[in-house]
Image (tube, coloured by chain):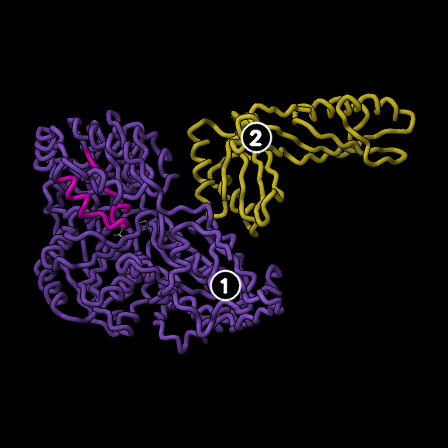
Chain colours: A yellow, B purple
Amino acid sequence: MKQLLALKVNDHPGVLHRITGLFLRRGFNIATITVGACEEPGVSRMTILLEVADERVMDQVRKQLAKQVDVLEVEDLTDRDAVTRELCLVRVEAPLKMRSDLHSLIQPFRAQLIDVGFETVVVEVTGSPAKIDALLDLLRPFGVLEIVRTGLAALPRERQTGNGGTARREARSVEV
Amino acid sequence: MSFEVTEGARAEALSPDAAAPVGTEAPAGEDSERGAEPRPEPPPVYRGADLLVEVLKEEGAEMLFGIPGGATINFYDALYNSGIPHVLARHEQGAIHAADGYARISGKVPVVTGTSGPGSTNLMTGIANAWFDSVPMVIFAGQVSTSVMGTDAFQESPIFSMTMGITKHNYQLMRGEDLPRVVKESFYLARTGRKGPVLIELPKDMTSNEIPYRKPVEMRLRAYNPTPKIDRALVEKVKRDLARAKRPVIVAGAGVVHAGASELLRAFAERARVPVVHTLLGLGTLPSDHPLSLGMGGMHGTVWANMALHECDFLLNIGSRFDDRLTGALEHFAPRARIAHVDIDEAELGKVLDEDYPIHGDARDALAILLDGAVDPSPSEEWLAYLESLRREYPLWYRTDRPYLQPQRVVQIASDLASDDVIVVTDVGQHQMWVAQFFRFRRPGRFVTSGGLGAMGFGLPAAIGAQIADRDALVLAFVGDGGFQMTVEELILLREYDLPVKILLFNNNSLGMVRQWQELFYEERYSATLFNIQPDFMRLADAYGIVGRRVETEEEARAVLEEAFRTRAPYLIEFVIDPMANVLPMVPPGNGVHEMQGVKPE
Ligand SMILES: Cc1ncc(C[n+]2csc(CCOP(=O)(O)OP(=O)(O)O)c2C)c(N)n1
């Protein structure tokens, strides 16, 4: 089963290694992992999509992570209402005469062309992994040359973050 | 100034009596009221190595173990006048196992050093050993200078990543100004919560460069909470349910020793009338001859301990991590029991078994709650009588039909002759199990053995550390001829530091434990386990200037041990034992603990 974890970790050298090393030793499969700065200086946020056997294993994962001195917070977003996003860049073969077809294809995905050449273009798309997969399927007939995906970034929705008042808790963000 | 520290950390870091290094004070310059230019004074500057030694003194570091080298030479230079004693081992593995033994007996946090490259890689086994058995220590692994790190420079090794999986935490010290904080955090981490080794990778320039030092030092351990608040209600529920159980049992592990909770354990077991199974590292938490002590459980456990594990209806595990050597095949482990588990490390809860009462907390806290108020004895007299009948029917035994000295008998004689304050150290192998089975442990925390890692070579150096920690105690080091030869070079320390350790060398001319498995499970195909040729151990003793005695009979054993125990000098006593002696009974690998073999003489 897939599990989605959000971590806050110290921004120290070796922390990513520490976390992935832990998964490696225990044979947990990482589907995606993203790391970057967050709202606090000196702290990074990691979003990890994991493939684990069952809830018991997941419980172990959570505890083992929490035990790391450099891990400040572990949040399990799997069954929570969270916004998740992945960024994908894809280089597609697109001779000039195909450009308008391409354009109309990617538009409903709110994808954009961020680099244009004579023979190829680079498309940028953000969204759920399923949406990205769907777009990639549509692009394949054109000739997909290169793909890069960032893996998931995730945040819980406001009403569940627990730091809003009652009124704010009613507010719901809308997935776009 | 703001400090991001946990409560405990704050107390440690800021305690007023944590003396500052010579003449440091917070910088002046707070009086900007009158518009005067606040001009902070530059903090005082120290050579990194001197600062390191000062911080070690602040932390109360009392004992160092190691071997110097190019990467740590500045540190050693600063130690020269420090007054902190340093034990110079002959191999880094010896140094760190000695520190391990020292830590277990003294309850303090020793410091271990190895130089970059080989010095540090030689520490690996000892680091892993301390990690598995939750032994506190701080390790300084020298490293090449930051300017050449990563270039495969002379004597460089990636010790930081190499030790990540076998330390409680580790640091790569890359900026001098982090040094005081990192060292303080290391000691704090090593000695709190679930204890363990903490390693600092120390590039050479960190000890040669000038470092500014400002007090106080901020610790950044905001998510680390070594003193979890125990779930009182859950412990009280355990107490109620345990009192109603018909066949209750307590499993006492190393956590009881670490928490200093043996007295509480004993009081609770007595008042609740519950028998206690010990893990290898939990031996001694109840005296071996206590009527409620069932001895050791598991692969080489007693029949009655293992039947207690198998037939119990309520199992309270305090401070053991359900190691597979204890549980045997999990599907047969305590199959009818409700299971309560107290552990200071939350990650141990639910790791092996799905406990009914997972209790995150210190053994001492749990036992204090269990003892609070009236303790109803469980209705277990019948249960105790049953276990007692097993004890009578299946006592531990050894062969009497062979013309050789039986090792178990030697353990018994040593146990009988030893004083109550004896410290028992073992290496790894058959002799370790014979000691676990036949030695009468009288006091908690006096049994030093490599439990989790099972590292041969541990015994002699660990005994050295133990004797340094308690100079007056009788220290017995039981070693096999195999493991002894792995760290035999440390013998010289017995003379150098005047340590009257008695080494009881069990010579069976083989790697006995592996040979036993080959005999029982591999059709006696003794592949690479028999020694064709051995050193002359008596001349070895001679070479190292200690007393050597060779023993072949029970009478000699008694006489020589009596002599050795009376004499304040190190002894190497070689017992030429039955080369075919086995550790029995035994739970064959893959079986449940109730499926033992060798429970009775054939
Ligand atoms: C460093 C290391 N290497 C190998 C082993 C595997 N091993 C476990 S017990 C044993 C035999 C030990 O022989 P010896 O030291 O002579 O003790 P005995 O079993 O004969 O009492 C071996 C090789 C180990 N535990 N540690």
Residue denoted by label 2: A156
Mark 2 Cα shell of 10 Å, populated few (<14), some (14-19), many (≥20): some
Secondary structure beneath dot 1 equals helix
- Quarter location, residue B352: top left
Residue denoted by label 1: B179
- Quarter location, residue B493: bottom left
Chain ID for label 2?
A
Secondary structure beneath dot 2 equals strand
Asked whether B587 or A28 is in front, the reply is A28
- Quarter location, residue B342: top left
Using the rendered image of the protein, determine whether residue B228 is visible from the camera's viewpoint.
yes
Q: Quadrant of the C terminus of chain B?
A: top left
Residue at image x 21%, y 56%?
A: B424
Query: Which three-letter amino acid code belongs to the residue tagged 2?
Result: Pro
Magenta-colored stretch includes residue B269:
yes
Chain ID for label 1?
B
Residue range (magenta): B249-270
